Image: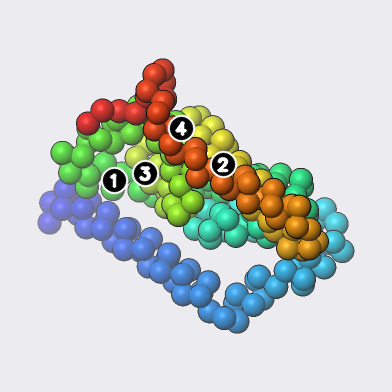
Amino acid sequence: MNERSSKRRNDLLRLLAIAAFFAALMVLLGHPGFREKVFDIERVRGGVQSGGWRAHTAFLATAAVGVAVGVPRLWICAVAGSLYGALLGTAFAQAASLIGAAIGFGAGRWLLQGPASRLLPARLVKWRDRFQANAFYWVLCLRLIPISNAGATNIFCGAMRVPFSPYLAATFLGQMPYAIGFALMGSSAAKENSVQFLAGLAVLALIFGAGKILAQLRGGEVKPPQP
């Protein structure tokens, strides 16, 4: 077996191992017993309130790792809001999202940059280059899509060698509306506050209009690449 074939085999094995990891994670998150323990808000709130700064740090670290491995970011925002209220919940959710995004980006670059470069078909190279050149615009669009998988986006951007600064800036801006909206709604559920619930719905409604606004931007650095 020549060196090229050996690298290709190792690349495929690495991809299969990563796919198996995320498949196992999905099974674990879907297990009722695990979900009951992890998402028992009353139990978690009691532990956070009585644990001081160590509990807050532990929650932030757990949430960040959760974002990195693909736990839906909207869950993280809602849980943070229910635990800390709208203001602090937004701050914790945003911090966890940024840290998790950086972890996932680093993992994608470390584990998949080589395989992606070697396995990417030649006809897709130009699209990768355009994605890199317009990274801020495209990452922002991905962050503003509510059904997009944050973990997959993090790893994909790292593997595609997207510049880190525009990636992180777009993540910060694109995640902020969701952090505010779902933290408000999580807080409203915990406090039974209808005003916060309506405010959260208003923020989410604004998000859905952001895509149309982005689509109309055609000048400057945010202009999307033409096929």
How far apart in space, not on screen, are marks 3 and 2 (Cα)?
31 Å
Q: Quadrant of residue 117?
A: top left
Q: Amino acid at mark 3?
A: Ala
How far apart in space, not on screen, are marks 1 and 2 (Cα)?
36 Å
What SS does tag 4 mark? helix
How far apart in space, not on screen, are marks 1 and 4 (Cα)?
32 Å
Disc number for residue 213: 4
Q: Amino acid at mark 4?
A: Ile
How far apart in space, not on screen, are marks 3 and 1 (Cα)?
6 Å
Labelled pair 3, 1 in contact (Cβ < 8 Å): yes
Q: Can you give x and y, in whole percent of width and height, for residue 89 in the image?
A: 73, 50
Q: Which residue is mark 2?
A: 206
How far apart in space, not on screen, are marks 4 and 2 (Cα)?
10 Å
How many neighbours does mark 3 have within 10 angstroms: few (below 14), some (14-19), or many (20 or more)?
A: many
Q: Can you give x and y, in whole percent of width and height, for residue 201 in the image?
A: 63, 51
Do we see residue 116 in this rendering?
yes
Q: Which residue is mark 3?
A: 159
Labelled pair 1, 2 in contact (Cβ < 8 Å): no
User: Would residue 57 be found to the left or right of residue 214 on screen?
Assistant: right
Labelled pair 4, 2 in contact (Cβ < 8 Å): no
How many neighbours does mark 1 have within 10 angstroms: few (below 14), some (14-19), or many (20 or more)?
A: some
What SS does tag 3 mark? helix
Q: Nearer the viewer, residue 35 or 106?
A: 35
Q: Amino acid at mark 1?
A: Ala
Quick one: label 3 or label 4, which is nearer the N terminus? 3
How many neighbours does mark 4 have within 10 angstroms: few (below 14), some (14-19), or many (20 or more)?
A: few
Quick one: label 1 or label 2, which is nearer the N terminus? 1
Q: Nearer the viewer, mark 3 or mark 2?
A: 2
Labelled pair 1, 4 in contact (Cβ < 8 Å): no
